[in-house]
Amino acid sequence: MRLYLSSFKISKKPQELVKLTDSNKNVAIILNARDHKKEQRGYFLPEETKILNDMGLNTEELDLRKYFGKEKELGKFLRKKI
């Protein structure tokens, strides 16, 4: 598993993210930093999904709130999807 962390959108170097994917084009979008602004979450998820899909990546949201205290389930998700 590889991580590409960006504090704002995809950053100015989206090609670096594509380089990390190799043949596996599955990526997870984690928007939990926006949990305190619920109205923004609904805006940013479709926008980020479109950007990543347009780059040839398959996206799925990973909402970490669903995995509090469920490390095994999180591991299963990551192995299956990413």
Image (spheres, rainbow, N blue to C red):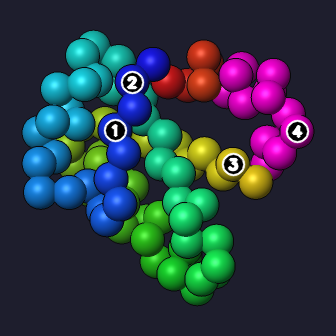
Determine which of the numbered discs, if any, sits on residue 69 in the image.
4
Q: Residue at x 79, y 29 (%)?
A: 71
Q: Is residue 13 magenta?
A: no
Alpha carbon distance from label 1 to label 2: 7 Å
Residue behind mark 3: 64
Tell me if label 2 and label 4 are in contact, CB under 8 Å.
Answer: no
Alpha carbon distance from label 4 to label 1: 24 Å
> From which residue to which does the magenta span run?
66-77
What secondary structure is found at the residue carrying circle 4?
Answer: loop
Give x and y (percent) for residue 28: 49, 40
Determine which of the numbered discs, if any, sits on residue 68 in the image.
none
Q: Is residue 72 magenta?
A: yes
Give the amino acid at mark 3.
Answer: Leu
Alpha carbon distance from label 4 to label 3: 10 Å
Tell me if label 1 and label 2 are in contact, CB under 8 Å.
Answer: yes
Residue behind mark 2: 2
Alpha carbon distance from label 3 to label 1: 16 Å
Give the amino acid at mark 4.
Answer: Gly
What secondary structure is found at the residue carrying circle 1?
Answer: loop
Front disc: 4 or 3: 4
- Residue 8 quadrant: bottom left
Say left or right for 23 vs 59. Answer: left
Alpha carbon distance from label 2 to label 3: 17 Å
Quick check: 3 above or below 61?
above
Q: Is residue 5 visible?
A: yes
Residue behind mark 1: 4
Tell me if label 4 and label 3 are in contact, CB under 8 Å.
Answer: no
What secondary structure is found at the residue carrying circle 2?
Answer: loop
> Which of the two labelled residues, at mark 2 and mark 4, occupies the earlier sequence position?
2
